Structures are given as C-alpha cells and as structure tokens.
Amino acid sequence: MKHDADDIFQEVFLRYVKKHPVFQSEDHRKAWLLRVTVNCANKFWNSFWQKKVQGLTQEPEFLEEEHLRLYDQLSKLPPKYREVIHLFYYEELSIEEISRILGRKNATVRTQLTRARAMLREVIKEDHV
C-alpha cells in the first residue's frame, strides 16, 4: 500500500511540475493538490490492474488500540463516505471546500456526511454487541 501511495504522490508531483499552476492563495494551492490527489487515487483504484489483481493486505500500524478500531470501522464504509469523513474531520475542510475538491454540490456533501456518520454509528454499535 505504501508503494501505491508513493506512486500517486509522484503522479501528483509530476502534474504540479509540468503544469506550473498559478494559485491565488495557499488555500487555492491546497485545494488544487487535494483535488489532483483524489483524481489520481481514483484513477489508480479504478484501473484495470487494480480491479484484476488482489494484493496482500497490510494493516496500518497504530499506537493506540482505539485508533485501530476506528480505522477498522471506517474501512467498512463505502469509499464516497470515507472520503467526506476524512476531508471533514482529518483535513478539517469546510463543506464548501470539500464540495469544490470532490466536484459535488454542497447539499450532496452534507447528505453524504450525515449518512456517513449514521453508518459509522451503526458499525460501532455492531462492533460493541
């Protein structure tokens, strides 16, 4: 998995170097980098190779058991819900920024975030039973 992330990072960096984009602000630069990273990751995961090859799974190493449980619970959500959860809580982006990065309407992002929270609540309840 780390090597896949490295490949995506290299692709994003190459696009940055080739295009020499001009940004109005650091927020604009961050949004551009996030959008290109999401696009490259989606392209990678939707490629023929990824769909036909099953690799070895490697769990991330967490220092705390609670983080490992949360990672496991989040991994049970569909990708479109994991995306909005990650961007909202871990990247601390607003609904508007997330919608711009993902190319979705604000209302769609709000709905996906609400559904993701509900789904995560259910997954957590199931794990505690």
Image (cartoon, rainbow, N blue to C red):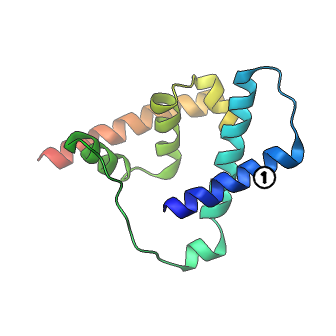
Give the residue displayed 56% in from the left and 25% down from the top: 93
* Number of residue marks: 1
Q: Is residue 47 visible?
A: yes
Q: Quadrant of residue 65 in the image?
A: top left
Front one among 94 and 40: 40
Q: Which residue is mark 1?
A: 14
31 left or right of 85 in image: right
Q: Is residue 123 visible?
A: no
Q: Residue furthest bottom?
A: 52
Q: Is residue 50 above or below residue 59?
A: below
Q: Is residue 26 above or below residue 51?
A: above
1 left or right of 39 in image: left
Front one among 102 and 66: 66
Q: Quadrant of residue 66 in the image?
A: top left
User: Tag 1's secondary structure?
Assistant: helix
Q: Amino acid at mark 1?
A: Leu
Give the residue displayed 59% in from the left and 34% down from the top: 108
93 left or right of 18 in image: left
Front one among 90 and 13: 13
Give the residue displayed 64% in from the left and 60% down from the top: 7
Q: Position of residue 27 (x, y in %)?
A: 70, 23
Q: Is residue 27 above or below residue 12?
A: above
